[in-house]
Image (cartoon, rainbow, N blue to C red):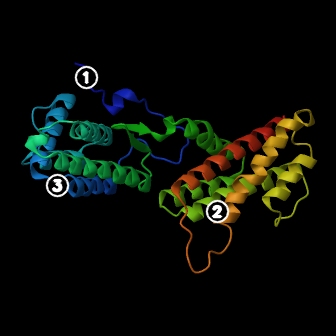
Amino acid sequence: MERFKLFSERNASDKTNDVYEYELVPKRLRIQLMHIFDEYITDLDFSVHFWSAVVRSIKKEFGVFDLPGRGPRTSVMTFLLEEDDPETIDTIDLIFHLINKSIISLNKSNPNGFNNYSKDQDRAIAHELNRCIKEANYRFKQNNFGYEIIDGQLIKIENQMIHRETIKPAIQLLFDEGFETASNEFLQAHEHYRKGEYTDAIVDAGRAFESTMKIICDKKNYPYSQKDTANALINKLVTNNLLPSNLQNHFNHLWNTLSCGLPTIRNSNGGHGQGVHENQVPESLVNFSINLAASNIVFLVKLYKESSN
């Protein structure tokens, strides 16, 4: 039988600059997870069965005979609350691995169901377990905890391609190259995103993009006005030959991306007053805006570095 690999076995530590925390589990998040489990794992028979399975798995994986606490649920909660961070991350990973296995089992076409439950009862339990995963992912983001539950495993956000190839390089480049204003605004965009303040996140992503261009203009002594829009700033970079002329066709497409991408999103959703009714900005749009800003920032700063060599 294939053994389930714990999180710490699947991932090596990486301490490079990032907007997320990967090694510390805040006490607030530990307590929130306990409340989440209590809210969504409510069926008595299933709860006893599930937490007993978690206890057995923890004892086997951590090589211990017993866990402190009276009863399987209390034992797991005590372990989750009191263990050191690496063991707690592994425990969270293990719990959601078993939750995912339970969802798959409950959704299978089994005429007897769990403990002879009806299929509707099985589906109801599975529905609550899916809600448990969804809220846990929200709380991870809220606490700056750099993981997401995907297919029953904790996955480092930094291991996702867009984050690895755009977000982290943008942070590193801004930090290394003296773009402090843009760096602060970009990190603030992530802070707003983490808190669910989506409109403000788009605004700060746009500000970071514009500040990057203004700082480049300052460093290269290109004349511009502090009131210049993103389109005007892009035009300054083009007219001052920061973009190579022999790649004009390529950069025409880039121009369209820079001119019609993030600034348009920002003007439509974040840059103007909303009147009486607040616009509901979808999370997917915020992700797109921040990723687009990061891609543009990385590109612009690399162009600046190449032109300065």
Residue pushed farthest bottom? 276
Residue 202 sits in which quadrant?
bottom right
Residue 175 percent across, percent down from the top left: 65, 46
Contact flag, marks 2 and 3 (Cβ < 8 Å) = no
Between marks 2 and 3 in the image, the one whose residue lies nearer the viewer: 3
Disc number at residue 3? 1
Q: Is residue 47 left or right of residue 131?
A: left
Sooner in the amino-acid sequence: mark 2 or mark 3: 3
Residue 84: x %, y % from top left: 28, 42
Please report the residue visible at 58 percent of the width from the left and 39 percent of the height from the top. 162
CA separation, marks 1 and 2? Answer: 46 Å
Q: Residue furthest top?
A: 1
Give the quadrant of the C terminus: top right
Amino acid type of the residue tagged 3 in the rendering: Thr
In the depicted structure, whether residue 24 falls above or below residue 53 = below
299 left or right, relative to 36 = right
Task: Please give the label number shown on residue 203.
Answer: 2
Crowding at dot 3, Cα within 10 Å, few <14 / some 14-19 / many 20+, comes out as: some
Q: Please state which amino acid type lies under the numbered disc 1.
A: Arg
Question: Sequence order check: which comes first, mark 1 or mark 2?
Answer: 1
